Image (cartoon, grey):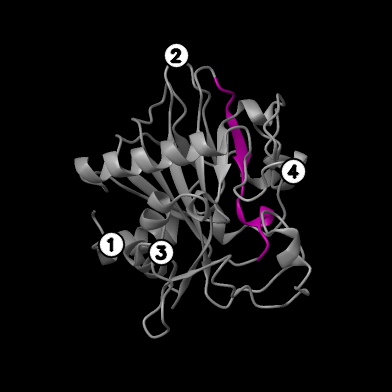
Amino acid sequence: MYTDLTQAQIDSYRNNGFIVIHDFLTADELETWRDAVEEAVAELGQWKLAGQEGNERWQEGDSYYDRVFVQRINLWQANEKVRQVMLDPRLGRMAAQLSGVEGIRLYHDQALHKAPWANPTAWHLDDPFWSFSSPDAISIWVALDDSTLENGCLYFMPGTHKRATFNSSGIGENLGDLFNVYPQWKNNPTVAAPMKAGSCSFHNGLVAHAAGANMTPGWRRAMTCLYMPDGSVFNGNQDVLPDSYVATLKIGAPLDSDEQNPLIYHPVKPLVTA
């Protein structure tokens, strides 16, 4: 696993809001990730969120959004192989270095698999969906298959994380709904980010990004993880947090449950281990 970041990479991330790291995983590591993720996705079946099987809110349907990608969340909580991968402190250290924070907690992981002929992913920001609000939130996106212009690779709008608020549009049928919220971005340049399998990107939770449609008969599989700076607090949005946990929270309460959001990197504090 390529984990040694250069200062140039860190500076590029902070300036643009994203960075692509080619050949992030070795061939053996890629097979380990693929095996773990596919096993966990199969185990969840039609349910999108681990631990919520039977909850209709999290049942896969036939909406436009359900045809954007196959989404399965918090696989680390349901599958030991994924837990081993996701709680790797090297991932947390990279996220901390790029975002410039001291400690990193896992907010949630998610498999995002574009099926053959899947819809495009509209321009959006990630952070406004989450249960905390931070300009330093960061996600990793790992290509499990080659991600190409034809099958739905990511696109980024460089620098938008510096000017974004915590307002956003949803991910709907209109590719450009985000520009109703940020009309000043309509003429911004964009960057396509095709990646070979085993490569990855990191992106800020407030950078505008999207993904194309899958115009091929093959799958475009990806595994992602969303990272929360240690010390983040509840903003009142439930998102993927379970009802029982939300019932214990008030707005402003620290999101420091190691059962829900494990600490995976900190230079001093003890970490949750796989």
The CA distance from mark 3 to mark 4 is 32 Å
Disc with the residue nearer the chain's start (2 vs 4): 4
Q: Residue furthest bottom?
A: 268
Disc with the residue nearer the chain's start (2 vs 3): 3
Which span is picked out in magenta?
A: 118-132
Query: For numbered disc 4, what is the local secondary structure?
Result: loop
Asked whether, in this view, residue 240 is left or right of residue 12, the answer is right
Amino acid marked by disc 3: Ala
Instruction: Please provide percent x and percent y for residue 70.
Output: 56, 32
Camera-side mark, 1 or 2: 2
User: Mark 1 highlights which residue?
Assistant: 8
Disc with the residue nearer the chain's start (1 vs 4): 1
Any mark on residue 217, and which? Answer: 2
Query: For numbered disc 2, what is the local secondary structure?
Result: loop
Any mark on residue 55, and which? Answer: 4
- Residue 123 is inside the magenta segment: yes
| On screen, residue 78 above or below 39 | below
Query: For numbered disc 1, what is the local secondary structure?
Result: helix
Asked whether, in this view, residue 69 is left or right of residue 197, the answer is right
Any mark on residue 232, and which? Answer: none
